[in-house]
Amino acid sequence: MNSQRIVALAGFRRYLWALGTVGSSAPFVGLFGTVVGILKAFQSMSQAGTGGFKVVSQGIAAALVATAAGLLVAIYAIIAYNYFVAKVGAIGVQYKVFCEEFLLALGEYGRAQADPVVAPQAQAPGKAPPCVAIKPWR
């Protein structure tokens, strides 16, 4: 049961690496766009031979758009990555609890099958009787 739980959780985690990679690399893509935009602005200044807002505005606008796009993608990717990692962790805990409960119930059923007759006076006062013996279906 434990190995099947691990396999199921591995299936849930299969593509989380891609989301984490997008979230961690998108700011660098935005930074690259910023550098390209600033280079374009300086190139425009060198071609015009003068400075000024009209000369550098197109390059700065491209730099700002690239920065904003990189940050936007990164923010949403990191939020989604953290959400899915938390969700997979919660599912893993639920699976582990269900497995443990199932194995405990199976053990009680096995004990009840081995000793189907339990005398009422043998039970401790205030304790519930053990699992009712159920004959297996054949």
Image (spheres, grey):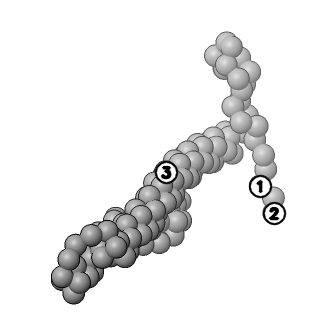
Q: Which residue is mark 1?
A: 136
**Residue farthest toward the top in the current orientation of the protein:** 125
- Is 105 in front, or is 10? 10
Q: Residues within 10 Å of mark 3 (few under 14, many from 20)?
A: few
Q: Residues within 10 Å of mark 2 (few under 14, many from 20)?
A: few
Determine the residue positioned at 78% across, 46% down. 134
> Could you tell me the amino acid type at mark 3?
Ala
SS for callout 2: loop
SS for callout 3: helix
SS for callout 1: loop
> Could you tell me the amino acid type at mark 1?
Pro
- Cα–Cα gap, marks 1 and 3: 40 Å
Q: Position of residue 104 (x, y in %)?
A: 58, 42
> Could you tell me the amino acid type at mark 2?
Arg
Kindly identify which numbered label has been placed on residue 138. 2
Q: Which residue is mark 3?
A: 86
Q: How many marks?
A: 3
Determine the residue positioned at 68% across, 13% down. 126
- Do the residues bearing badges 1 and 2 touch, measured as CB atoms within 8 Å? yes
- Is 115 in front, or is 27? 27
Q: Position of residue 81 (x, y in %)?
A: 46, 59
Quarter location, residue 48: bottom left
